[in-house]
Amino acid sequence: MPKRQMFTKVLVANRGEIAVRVLRACRELGLETVAVFSDADRTALHPRYADEAYWLGPSPARESYLRGDRIIQIARECGAGAIHPGYGFLAERDDFAHAVEQAGLVFIGPRPSAIAAMGDKATARATVAAAGVRVVPGTEGEGGLRDEEILAIAPQVGFPLLIKATAGGGGKGMREVQAMDDLQALLQSARREAEAAFGDGSVYLEKLVTGARHIEFQIMADSHGNIIHLGERECSLQRRHQKLLEEAPSPSMEDDLRYRMGQVACTAAASVGYLNAGTIEFLVDKDHNFFFLEMNTRLQVEHPVTEMVTGIDIVKEQIRIARGRKLRYAQSDVQFNGWAIECRINAEDPYNNFMPSTGVLTHVLPPTGPGVRVDTGVFPGFEVSPYYDSLISKLICWGETRGEAILRMRRALEEYRILGVKTNIPFHQSIMDLTRFLAGHYDTRFVEERFSMEEAEEGKASYPEIAAILGTLVAHRESQQASQIVQRGERDASNWKWVSRYERMQR
């Protein structure tokens, strides 16, 4: 019988919308909460939302959110019994999970051994291949490769190929290489980005499969030997391997394929004695052949679409499992209801090659209404800094059918108002109008090879006359306000004071 882990206070070792998301789940479970924050996040939402908040360090992630020793020290000093890592930062670091357990705390996530086996992407490929699961062709074996080894192996893998970080995902530390001449420079660039994001610059190579769809399966496993999957998520709409939009279920999925991929996902998780929430990612070609891509040993950014179609709160289940309890659901209990789409609202300019946009948010008005969910950690006055990723919020819409979900997302995007920085909302609006998206005919290369903002907006009415009238009215109002400013007189005192002095002198 697995030992029950009782804790009443949880430290959330993350920031932004995911920190707020976890804090809310803890509150609903009656748990006390602790937030940590850097200099840049001193006035952010997550330290305000938690019961207690502690300063972690300067703004750069390496000096704050990647300081595992400091986070554990804070947890022990404030009496927290468990640490939830969220996603990114330390979420897939087995040495951090191990240090948490050594400190007598509960890590709300997989066992350190499972993170080491599956969190390291190169090791994961070797592990699932040994279990009989097909993997995308690429670097064989485990362990970090030196630059000269990678340069020697690359021609055998074949071009185009991908350089990928072994320690994490989310497109960080990933580079596409078209020819041998480009490999050396891109290799150094990928190592630097991986080192900054995960504290580990190790990389491996993988063949780039063209025309494929990126489909992932959410799995949950408890300490009583139960493993289930919660269905798939379609994540093919990406730019530079960074997911932009996800939906559940996939428009290309069939019942038989879902059954086979779900079985393989559970088998891959069982092969490392997996515990808690995780995601098995696949590439699916045009003939519905699927290959293991990687496993993310953490909560995913896009987990809300699965929650919307299954009705299962994944973060609460994570906490229950960490307490040593059984999963509340068997595989037969998991039913899919309707369709959900998630748009990642980022602070970036879609008209300027998605350049990051930083600054203070002067106005934020999120959409509401039936079937609309917004996960965010920002508010008017919040500063989008250059220290962390550009995610402002996740906009999730649910409908009984895919068509209803798309219509609802169109309405929500139109209602969403964010001023102060540029956002990719116009990009998502263009995607919602594309015939190929409506038909579900897209793959991982769609955005980069067959989409442009200029073409998507051709023929759309721009109403320049209305814009000119509004601009004139604003300029007129500002000039009126300026003309009403009373200029101070030459004397350094108001007329009221002069009158008062004159009256006293005449008495």
Image (cartoon, helix red, strand yellow):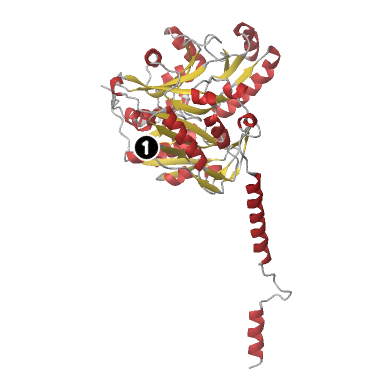
Question: Residue 507: where, in percent of width, then height?
Answer: 63, 93
> How many other residues sit within 10 Å of disc 1, few (<14), some (14-19) or many (≥20)?
some
Question: Residue 223: where, in percent of width, then height?
Answer: 31, 22
Farthest residue to the left: give it.
Answer: 1
| Pick the front one: 219 or 411 | 411
Q: Judge whether residue 360 can be spotted in this image.
A: yes
Residue type at mark 1: give it.
Ala
Rendering quarter of residue 354: top right
Q: Judge whether residue 13 can be spotted in this image.
A: no
Question: Residue 452: where, in percent of width, then height?
Answer: 63, 28
| Pick the front one: 72 or 413 | 413
Q: Residue 390 vs residue 126: left or right?
A: right
Q: Which quarter of the rendered picture does the N terminus lie within?
A: top left
For residue 60, above or below residue 149? below
Q: In terms of secondary structure, where does tag 1 sit?
A: helix
| Pick the front one: 454 or 37 | 454
In the picture of the structure, the residue carrying the numbered disc 1 is: 25
For residue 112, above or below residue 504? above
Q: Residue 189 vs residue 404: left or right?
A: right
Question: At 66% from the left edge and 79% from the top edge, which residue is drawn?
Answer: 495
Question: At 28% from the left edge and 23% from the top edge, which residue is drawn?
Answer: 333
| Pick the front one: 99 or 222 | 222
Question: At 66% from the left edge and 34% from the top edge, which residue is drawn?
Answer: 352
